[in-house]
Image (tube, grey):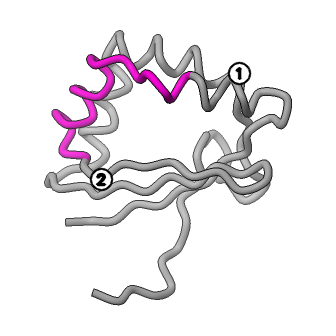
């Protein structure tokens, strides 16, 4: 199992809309996440930053993320959420969510 933590900015004027979108995530989007071996997915808000955490239980995260990006329901979902977000300064060029480094884990 691989833990993935990411960060992105939420536009302050879109924070309420972002919360509202996530009160009712479409079932096909959730099913795709599960099909891509993603579990325990959560998003947290602090100020203007969103922090996402999920556990990946597959063998090829890049392939599963590519399959997710090819999914019509997921693409439509991203079209709804993207106007609420902006990459953080630390994000690599061409990326949306920036991966965070794990510096501690207690199991």
Quarter of the view holding residue 98: bottom right
For residue 49, which numbered disc appears in the image? none
Left or right: residue 18 versus residue 58 is: right
Residue toward you, 32 or 70: 32
**Is disc 1 surrounded by few (<14), some (14 to 19) or many (20+) residues within 10 Å?**
few
Q: How many angstroms separate mark 2 from mark 1 (CA)?
A: 25 Å
Q: Secondary structure at mark 2?
A: strand
Q: In the rendered image, which quarter contains the C terminus?
A: bottom left
Up the image or down, 75 lies above or below 104; here it is: above
- Where residue 15 appears, as percent x and y from the top left, is 73, 33
Q: Earlier along the polypeptide chain: callout 2 or callout 1?
A: 2
Q: Secondary structure at mark 1?
A: helix
From the image, tell me which residue sits under label 1.
83
- Where residue 56 appears, as percent x and y from the top left, is 25, 55
From the image, tell me which residue sits under label 2.
40
- Total numbered circles: 2
Rendered residue at 66%/47% (across/down): 8
Rendered residue at 57%/52% (across/down): 44
Q: Which residues are magenta?
A: 21-38
Residue toward you, 31 or 61: 31
Up the image or down, 46 lies above or below 11; here it is: below
Mark nearest the camera among 2 and 1 is 2
Quarter of the view holding residue 55: bottom left
36 in magenta: yes
Q: In the rendered image, which quarter contains the N terminus?
A: bottom left
Rendered residue at 38%/25% (across/down): 69
28 in magenta: yes
Left or right: residue 48 versus residue 81 is: right
Rendered residue at 72%/59% (across/down): 90
Residue toward you, 90 or 105: 105
Examine the residues drawn in magenta and state their main secondary structure.
helix
């Amino acid at each position: 199992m691989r833990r993935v933590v990411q960060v992105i900015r939420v536009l302050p004027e879109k924070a309420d809309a972002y919360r509202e979108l996530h009160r009712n995530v479409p079932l096909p989007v959730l099913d795709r996440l599960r099909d891509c071996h993603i579990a325990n997915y959560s998003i947290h808000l602090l100020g203007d930053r969103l922090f996402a955490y999920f556990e990946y239980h597959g063998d090829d995260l890049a392939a599963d993320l590519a399959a997710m990006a090819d999914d019509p329901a997921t693409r439509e979902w991203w079209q709804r959420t993207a106007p609420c977000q902006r990459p953080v300064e630390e994000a690599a060029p061409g990326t949306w969510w920036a991966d965070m480094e794990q510096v501690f884990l207690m199991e």
